[in-house]
Image: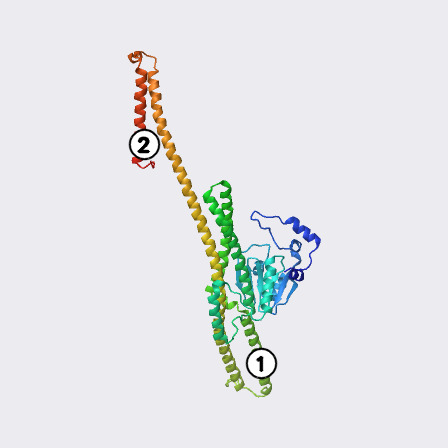
Amino acid sequence: MADLKERLLPPKPASAINLRDSSYRPSASGRQPFQGVDVLGLKKRGQGLRSWIRVDSSGNSQIIEVDKFTMMRRCDLPARDLRLLDPLFVYPSTILGREKAIVVNLEQIRCIITADEVLLLNSLDSYVLQYVVELQRRLMTPGVGEVWQSEGAELNRRRSRNFDSVFGNTSPDYLPFEFRALEVALEAACTFLDSQAAELEIEAYPLLDELTSKISTLNLERVRRLKSRLVALTRRVQKVRDEIEQLMDDDGDMAEMYLTEKKSRMESSFYGDQSLMGFRSNDGGTSISAPVSPVSSPPDSRKLEKSLSIARSRHESMKSTESATENIEELEMLLEAYFVVIDSTLNKLTSLKEYIDDTEDFINIQLDNVRNQLIQFELLLTTATFVVAIFGVVAGIFGMNFAVPLFDDAGAFKWVLIITGVAGVVIFCAFVWFFKYRRLMPL
């Protein structure tokens, strides 16, 4: 990896390194802004030249300096498609099929795939270098074209049988160049998202179990941050899944992404037009002296030319229709395999979110139970306070400044206390029985 980085990436000046080290500070999410981007190169965007990594169909890579307008003419892309690859902007995952290129924006992998080459922005991100290494390995290694996940094993066997029946090829790993490059990008994105989901699972379950056993402010804050990361990751995985599903549902977009077939079709059509022009010039040279009546039927050469043109157009139309159907099935199986992988990742995140929701419900139930116990204890205290208030009423009555014959009796005070205490106990027991009867307290 280090050798590839030294070979692909030109040396950066010391000023650029110092500027990058001083300006990159971790954000609130823990990720560094503009990670893997040359700040000095971004300040010179007005000059137009940008550094790209080019990987051809043979697996050879090189660094090229191309401005934006040259890249637009080279790949026949509008400016809005190139904005998807700009590291300064944050766009959701997108796969766009154009006339001569496929624009891929999947997590860290932002590239342009044509029928002959892959163009990536020259970045310091390790995932970009891993993508280049894996693509070169698959292009240079014979017989290694597909690396499927375990969930897509059955789909791989189905696709192999399809290739054998359609193309008559004994190698099940054949794919056009653009599909192989697209597959490496899909695999890199799915693997990256799945690894992040696995790390989140490893961190989440012990934390949630600790929260259920001990509810504290620190644990609640950690769970809140964990849930924020989960929501953000789920949104990214859902976007990749929706993009793959949208491609699978649209046959036109899938047919538009078969660049090798369109290129060969254009070349064959160009050569056919050249041969037809040569035949027309030869025919015109032989019959240039013959007079032609304006009302007479067209000569035999024009009839032959017209019939050949009609036959050739019908043949190309039938051939393109059949090959488009076959290629749509081929690309659909490729997308379906990674759709299974990304859907499995989404199911993991969905299960984790449900576990968090269940934990929150359990904590809410615990808090409600504690709250109910406090309410019951408060009800008992209120009843006891009412009973004690009876003694205050009796004391207030006997504390009045007027003469009562009962005051002259020596044992009157004792009987007043006894009668008042018994009355208080009876009233308290009556309240408790009422609460139990109305099921206000589990006594």
Q: Is residue 118 left or right of residue 156?
A: right
Identified at 48% across, 66% down, the residue is 153
Left or right of 362: which side holds 187? right
Q: Secondary structure at mark 1?
A: helix
Assess disc 1: are there few (<14), some (14-19) or many (≥20) residues with their C-alpha within 10 Å of its C-alpha.
few
- Residue 232 visible somewhere in the drawing: no
Task: Give residue 345's position: percent from left, percent from top.
Answer: 48, 57
Q: Closer to the camera: disc 1 or disc 2?
A: 2
Residue that badge 2 annotates? 432
157 is higher (above) or lower (below) than 34 = below
Residue located farthest toward the right when viewing the structure as drawn: 14
Closer to the camera, 16 or 421? 421
Look at the image and name its color scheme: rainbow
Task: Please name whichever residue, 71 or 379, is drawn nearer the observer in this view of the structure.
Answer: 379
Residue 275 got which mark? 1
Distance, label 1 to label 2, CA atoms, is: 107 Å
Q: Earlier in the sequence, mark 1 or mark 2?
A: 1
Task: Give residue 173's position: percent from left, percent from top.
Answer: 53, 70
In the image, what residue type sits under mark 1?
Ser
- The secondary structure type at the circle numbered 2 is helix
**Badge 2 local density, few (<14 within 10 Å), some, or many (20+)?**
some
On screen, residue 389 above or below 333: above
What's the residue type where badge 2 is placed? Val
Counting from the top left corner in percent of width and height, residue 131 is at: 59, 62
Q: Is residue 431 above or below residue 281?
A: above
Q: Which mark is residue 18?
A: none
Q: Quadrant of residue 398?
A: top left
Task: Let me know if residue 161 appears in the view.
Answer: yes
Q: Is residue 282 left or right of residue 384?
A: right
